Image (cartoon, helix red, strand yellow):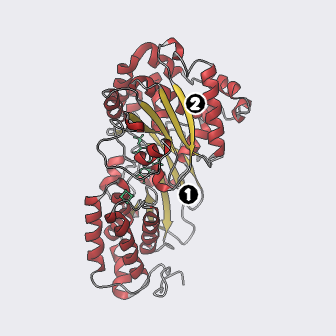
Amino acid sequence: MTTIIRTPAEWPSVLLARAAALKDHPAMGFDDPSAALDAAVAAGAFEGLRRAVRDLGPAGTIATVATAGLRGRGGAGYPTAAKWRAAAAHGAPRYVVAHGYGADPGSLTDRALIEADPFGVVEGLAIAAIAVGATDAIVAVRAGDVEAVRRLEGVVAAAEEAGFLGEDVLGSGHDVNVLVRPVQGAYMLGEETVLLKALEGRRGQPEQRPPYPAERGLFGMPTVVQNVQTLAAVPWIVVNGAPAWAGIGSARATGTILVQVRGPERAGVAEVPLGTPLREVIALGGQPPRRHSLKAVVIGGPSGGLVPPELLDTPYDFDALRAVGAHIGSGSVIAADDRACIVDLARLLTAFCSTEACGKTIPCRIGTRRLVEIAARITDGRPRPTDLQLLADLSADMTDSALCDHERLATLPLTSGMRYFRSELDDHLLRSSCPAGVCRPIAVGAAL
Ligand SMILES: Cc1cc2nc3c(=O)[nH]c(=O)nc-3n(C[C@H](O)[C@H](O)[C@H](O)COP(=O)(O)O)c2cc1C
Ligand code: SF4
């Protein structure tokens, strides 16, 4: 099971609250999914679905999600209600897909949520399906997350039995058939158009958007693809009201989000209110060891930004992180101390992005490789005089020409590294020196 990091008692908990309340309940081993469902229902599960059906109806549900200001947790922060409205405006059949693949191997947020509270994910999926008029819904989950798959399958079967899914959900006249689909693939399987192709049984490479999946998605029909966290927030919003959700977090980034923290003392998943200063998020991973200090925070996963300690007051939210050259991405927040070489770190992250690029479009396929080559020249101590300019120009061209977000984001480690750690870069470029002592053969730093 994934490690959950405890947060300060005054921080609100939404996504992991029921799991915490039921953690010692004997049924939560999921050996008997019906017993687990009974326990969860007694703790409030499926009350949101009941209210959405009984009190709100599809239009009222979408309006509530809009008023709450819920934005997608899969990385881009797109307004959830806008996606639902777009799908509902296009012809049936429609689909809803709960995205629980968790593409970043270093972030277990989605797996942690599914293991902790699969009820919230399935309930949110059912509410979304009824709101947009979809009768078929899919939970896509990483096949290797065996426990998550087992729990989801158990909950879906038990919820059908109890009348929360299947024909005529809670006597509403709406049918919602939920299929759990274990999927396995590379990093790019996380991109929504690739995931949809995989669900169709086809080889996956990203498609140009628009049209967005909400208009033309699974089998060419309107499809809402929503991260599992986004869906799990919906029942809570319906039960507690949009103002309660909007009261958590910051004005343009409401509610809580799961973060994968990796610090010197501990690593695990924590639920934090959006807008929490980065300083408090990174502190959940503990303090650097004696005689060492924090040098950078890697935010957003392999295509993440490198943010210096001077920016630790930045709120952890979609727009504020984008403004400093990072992004929420996979929810990963990693502390790097002064033993890390920023240039080498950026090279490693870019190399991952290059390897994982699907190869469909030339600017990304070749561009990411050229970025890695330039970075490697610098870490190897054989830079060319034009390399910095080349990095900047190439990154700008790639950002402009990107077919999918991967290409745009793959430039972030190096562009943020150049922006905030210029003196360390100059040490490599002008003085053939790596202050951290990481890059050989030029290493002359403190770690030697
Ligand atoms: C390379 C790449 C990987 C992605 N991986 C994931 C992922 O693992 N999980 C996810 O929910 N979204 C992922 N996304 C974002 C999805 O394409 C999509 O925007 C998201 O699932 C929509 O749901 P949301 O609105 O709830 O965020 C990825 C995007 C890219 C470009
Ligand atoms: S931008 Fe990169 S990852 Fe995206 S489709 Fe093109 S080659 Fe594939």
Which residue corresponds to the image point at 39% horizontal and 81% vertical from the top-left? Answer: 378
241 relative to 100, above or below: above
Q: Quadrant of residue 374?
A: bottom left
> What kind of element bears circle 1?
loop
**176 lies left or right of 326:** right
Q: Which mark is residue 286?
A: 1
Residue at image mark 2: 119
Pointer 1 residue Cβ closer than 8 Å to ligand 1: no
Q: Nearer the viewer, residue 50 or 244?
A: 50
Q: Amino acid at mark 1?
A: Gly
Q: Position of residue 439 (x, y in %)?
A: 48, 81
Q: Position of residue 444 (x, y in %)?
A: 47, 87
Q: Quadrant of residue 323?
A: bottom left
Which of the four quarters of the rendered structure image does ligand 2 lie in?
A: bottom left
Foreground disc of the pair 1, 2: 2
Q: Nearer the viewer, residue 372 or 2?
A: 372
Q: Nearer the viewer, residue 372 or 326?
A: 372
N-terminal-most mark, 1 or 2: 2
Which residue corresponds to the image point at 29% horizontal and 60% vertical from the top-left? Answer: 399
